[in-house]
Amino acid sequence: MKTDRFQHPDHYLIDELLTEEHRLIRDSVREWVKRELSPIIEDYAQRAEFPRHILRGLGEIGAFGPSLPSEYGCGGLDQISYGLIMQELERCDSGIRSTASVQGSLVMFPIYAYGSEEQKRRFLPKLATGELMGCFGLTEPDFGSNPGGMTTNYRDAGDHFVLNGAKMWISNSPFADIAIVWAKNEEGRIHGLIVERGMEGFTTPETHNKWSLRASATGELVFDEVKVPKSNLLPGVSGLKGPMSCLDSARYGIAWGAVGAAMDCYDSALNYAKERIQFDKPIAAFQLTQKKLAEMVTEITKAQLMNWRLGVLKNEGRATTAQISMAKRNNVEIALRIAREARQIHGGMGITGEYPIMRHMMNLESVVTYEGTHDIHLLITGWTSPALPLSGSPYCRFNPGIRSVVELRCTVFE
């Protein structure tokens, strides 16, 4: 069994910007990851299986909804703490972070923000411990970047609603106990429904043959005349504001998580370069290798600083959708580049399961697309940045179809 020797890079002494509590939370999650996840993650990824036995452990370390209030059984932590937890989980594997991110940001957050008091009391404490697991249903087979085009719908049937439609690319769906499903009512307005496993007509087929996020469970949500109690409607929001606010929270976590993956690739490449002997000396002694490593740690440092500042703004309630999009887009992009450079340093060994590089690289190919594609986040940044004039920016000369996507994500959260 391999030993996890990871040490995080801190070229700008960013730890000094963190509180003692921040560092304690990060280090405790890191130790748990090293003990419980690192020894098994390659095996589960090779078998394309999610390690379900870790769910209660994730609950015990506070990975589910850590920034939600303690009165509902959650951590009551700040946003930087939440980011650091996501960083440490994705340092191990993007799929593990996805599981926690979906649970906290896409399931627990909408129940807390838009649910009734009865819904909060009923679901949040059990979701926080991992006794219940959830998933988030927004993307459909024909509607990804344009969620407003969704066709999943429900109608009023007296004492209940009847839900029909389908969602796909849903993390956690194969084992989720509940699903937060966004659907249109008879007037075409989007609302959130809590759909529970066991409701007749509700199925969650698993998605197989993935080359990415192999240690994560992905599936569909299928609704065939599903009877949903009216008490399961989220009463506090209508329109796309609901799901988009959830995605903002999840994308914030991704921005931190992607840096964790980049750190792991850098750390592995650095250690390998020190140990791999060629031409009678370690390859770390060659300037071309040093160039790769120096560029990696530079990009990681810039992303760390961006995350820290974004966390401060989020704690103050001032973080914008555009700021979150910029961080998600930038940090996933640099993580992908770092993974590819790390693979070069590892040579042929970089494609094997002996090292985490190829697994991170494959995972990040999903991360760069989900929760808003790379291009969508560029459009959001261009559309909403005060430094870019609305009429003059090349990012804002859209055809009507593309413009509506950006408006849906940035401005028309009715």
Image (cartoon, rainbow, N blue to C red):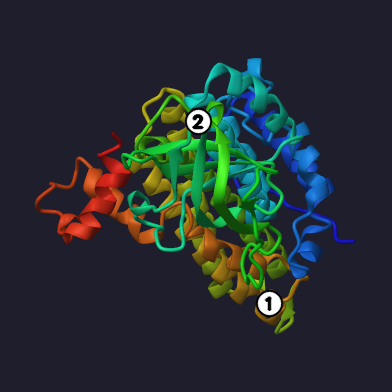
For label 2, the crowd category at 10 Å Cα-Cα, with few meaning under 14, some 14 to 19 and many 20 or more, is many
Q: Which residue is mark 2?
A: 233
SS at mark 1? Answer: helix
Residue 36's mark?
none
Left or right: 53, with 410 as reference point: right
Q: Quadrant of the N terminus?
A: bottom right
Q: State the residue lying farthest toward the left.
A: 391
Residue 239: image quadrant is top left
Residue type indicated by callout 2: Leu
Residue type indicated by callout 1: Ile
SS at mark 2? Answer: loop
- The location of residue 41, given as percent across then percent down, is 77, 59
State the separation of the CA atoms marked 2 and 1.
47 Å
Is any atom of residue 8 visible in this view? no
Is 400 rendered above or below residue 308? below
Give the residue drawn at x 24%, y 43%.
Answer: 384
Q: Quadrant of the C terminus?
A: top left
For label 1, the crowd category at 10 Å Cα-Cα, with few meaning under 14, some 14 to 19 and many 20 or more, is some
Give the residue drawn at x 52%, y 52%.
Answer: 300
Residue 351's mark?
1
Is 207 rendered above or below residue 196? below
Left or right: 149, with 70 as reference point: left
Give the residue drawn at x 67%, y 74%.
Answer: 346
Pointers 2 and 1 in contact (C-beta within 8 Å)? no
